[in-house]
């Protein structure tokens, strides 16, 4: 067998409902990273020290309620940048006004990798910015709901 068979077969039971609650980035400077994500509209929900090893900063966007969607982990004593690798892509957030959002971010020194564009005709306008630790964030323009 060349591949593992991962198909799901019905067993008559039901899988408990699951949901994605957050993603985690390892960071090198708490204040710089928190300021960057606050510029994107996130707010800090809480900080949780992990013994004397690390500090987790939990953040979310206003529509997330109290559920944090982003965990920033600062490993105490780490000064060199993390190797992001080739398998990781990005997180994505939405805005109703991409040009206005980019103008506000520019005032804080945050610039897109390239000007906004669409992937397909009639598709949403998008662009990418990078956080202080070089993680990519996609900003997608979506009409108000």
Image (tube, grey):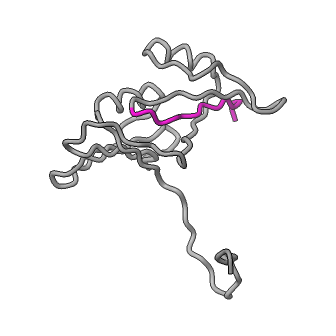
Q: Residue furthest left?
A: 52
Residue 92 at what x, y percent from top left? 58, 39
> Residue drawn at (20%, 44%), measured in percent from left and top?
76
> Residue drawn at (67%, 87%), measured in percent from left and top?
11
Residue 145 at what x, y percent from top left? 70, 35
Q: Is residue 44 above or below residue 95?
A: below
Q: Range of the magenta residues?
A: 133-145
Name the foreground residue: 48 vs 25: 25
- Judge left or right: residue 48 versus residue 129: left
- Judge left or right: residue 109 versus residue 10: left
- Judge left or right: residue 6 versus residue 88: right
Name the foreground residue: 113 vs 24: 113
Name the foreground residue: 44 vs 63: 44
Q: Is residue 141 magenta?
A: yes
- Judge left or right: residue 132 versus residue 40: left
> Residue drawn at (19%, 51%), measured in percent from left and top?
53
């Amino acid at each position: 067998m060349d591949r593992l068979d991962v198909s799901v077969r019905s067993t008559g039971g039901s899988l408990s409902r699951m949901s994605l609650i957050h993603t985690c980035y390892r960071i090198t400077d708490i204040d710089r990273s928190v300021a960057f994500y606050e510029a994107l509209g996130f707010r800090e929900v809480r900080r949780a020290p992990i013994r004397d090893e690390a500090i987790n900063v939990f953040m979310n966007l206003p529509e997330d309620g109290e559920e944090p969607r982003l965990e920033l982990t600062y490993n105490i004593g780490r000064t060199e940048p993390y190797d992001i690798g080739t398998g990781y892509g990005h997180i994505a957030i939405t805005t109703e006004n991409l040009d206005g959002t980019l103008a506000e971010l520019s005032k804080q020194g945050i610039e897109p990798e390239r000007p906004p564009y669409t992937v397909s005709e009639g598709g949403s306008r998008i662009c990418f910015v990078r956080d202080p630790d070089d993680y990519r964030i996609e900003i997608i323009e979506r009409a108000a709901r």
